[in-house]
Amino acid sequence: MTIPSFVIGIAGGTGAGKTTVARLITENVGDSVTRIPVDNYYKDLSHLPIEERETVNYDHPSAFEWSLLRTQLENLLEGRSIEMPEYDFTAHNRKSDRTIVEPTDVIVLEGIFALYDEKVTEMLDLRLYVETDADVRILRRIQRDVIDRGRKLEGVMQQYLDTVKPMHEQFIEPTKSHADLIIPEGANSVAVNLLEEKIRTEVEGNSSRNWERDSIENELTGTLEIEDD
Ligand SMILES: Nc1ncnc2c1ncn2[C@@H]1O[C@H](COP(=O)(O)OP(=O)(O)O)[C@@H](O)[C@H]1O
Ligand SMILES: Nc1ccn([C@@H]2O[C@H](COP(=O)(O)O)[C@@H](O)[C@H]2O)c(=O)n1
């Protein structure tokens, strides 16, 4: 059983480069890392027809099922596996399938609201905010939404002006103040290299959470290790 030793939250606006940063800083820890996209915790809207789901404000905190995210994160931190929901951006809804996620040494929680909820934020060992100019972000978003998410250009532009931009300013940007580190221009190589090194050190056993991990493991196995020195 693994009790995670290092939990990282990566927040930032849409298209800021959160996923890219998450991938790059954990590239060298192999199977010891699990990525949890906050997007997977969008509420299940199966009770609404697609036309109504298309009009939901997905950049408001109320669009997420926070209680489920808190519980599942807590479970992972206590060494239990979870059934993580999956999200379908084309259907604007949660998928019927869930993914079994086992706890690993490093957990990366990533999404526009990764630093929003107080209880979730308390569970993080390192809080990062990826900051990228709004013009760069919207250009990336247009490309992604049209190509990968089957959206129409007019719709993407309208959604940006109606909800994405104002919600970013009201709710997402202020979470920067909860960050330990602000990463300018996304995956810049200096920040990536420093964070990569930090994560490697934590995985190798220098984190304070390892003390917690050892004591939980001992409690569970009923053993007590006495150090010689
Ligand atoms: N530093 C960067 N330089 C150039 N392109 C980038 C950089 N970071 C991310 N991208 C590209 O921008 C797009 C959005 O990045 P992504 O990491 O998915 O953002 P987010 O997860 O914040 O929405 C992707 O196509 C990605 O390849
Ligand atoms: N049905 C949905 C759900 C979410 N979105 C948008 O996704 C954005 C967050 O994802 P990033 O990878 O860009 O961080 C968010 O801004 C939502 O507007 C959507 O368009 N449709």
Image: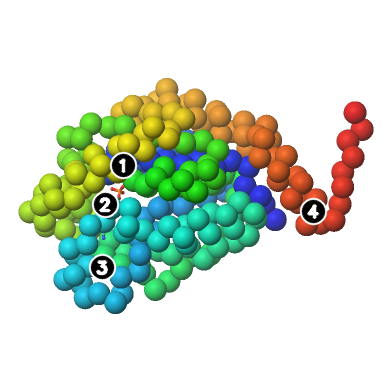
Q: Is mark 4 within 8 Å of ligand 1?
A: no
Q: Secondary structure at mark 3?
A: loop
Q: Which circle's residue, 4 or 1, is located before the other in the chain?
A: 1
Question: Quadrant location of residue 81?
Answer: bottom right
- Would you place residue 211 above or below residue 196 in this image? below
Q: Are marks 2 and 1 in contact (CB under 8 Å)?
A: yes
Question: Quadrant location of residue 46?
Answer: bottom left
The answer to whether residue 198 is seen in the rendering is yes
Q: Which circle's residue, 3 or 4, is located before the other in the chain?
A: 3
Q: What amino acid type should be assigned to the residue bearing mark 1? A: Ile
For marks 2 and 1, give the CA distance: 9 Å
The answer to whether residue 153 is seen in the rendering is no
For marks 3 and 2, give the CA distance: 16 Å
Q: Secondary structure at mark 2?
A: loop
**Mark 2 = which residue?**
59
Q: Position of residue 171 (x, y in %)?
A: 30, 43
Q: Which circle's residue, 3 or 2, is located before the other in the chain?
A: 2
Q: Is mark 2 within 8 Å of ligand 2?
A: yes
**Mark 1 = which residue?**
172
Q: Position of residue 109 (x, y in %)?
A: 46, 47
Q: What amino acid type should be assigned to the residue bearing mark 2? A: Asp
**Mark 3 = which residue?**
91
Crowd tier of the residue under label 3, counting other residues whose Cα lies within 10 Å: few below 14, some 14–19, many 20 or above:
some
For marks 2 and 4, give the CA distance: 42 Å
Q: Work out which quarter of the rendered image holds the C terminus and state it.
A: top right
**Mark 4 = which residue?**
219
138 left or right, relative to 173: left
Q: Nearer the viewer, mark 3 or mark 1?
A: 1
Residue drawn at 49 percent across, 30 percent down: 195
Q: Nearer the viewer, mark 3 or mark 4?
A: 4
Q: Which circle's residue, 3 or 1, is located before the other in the chain?
A: 3
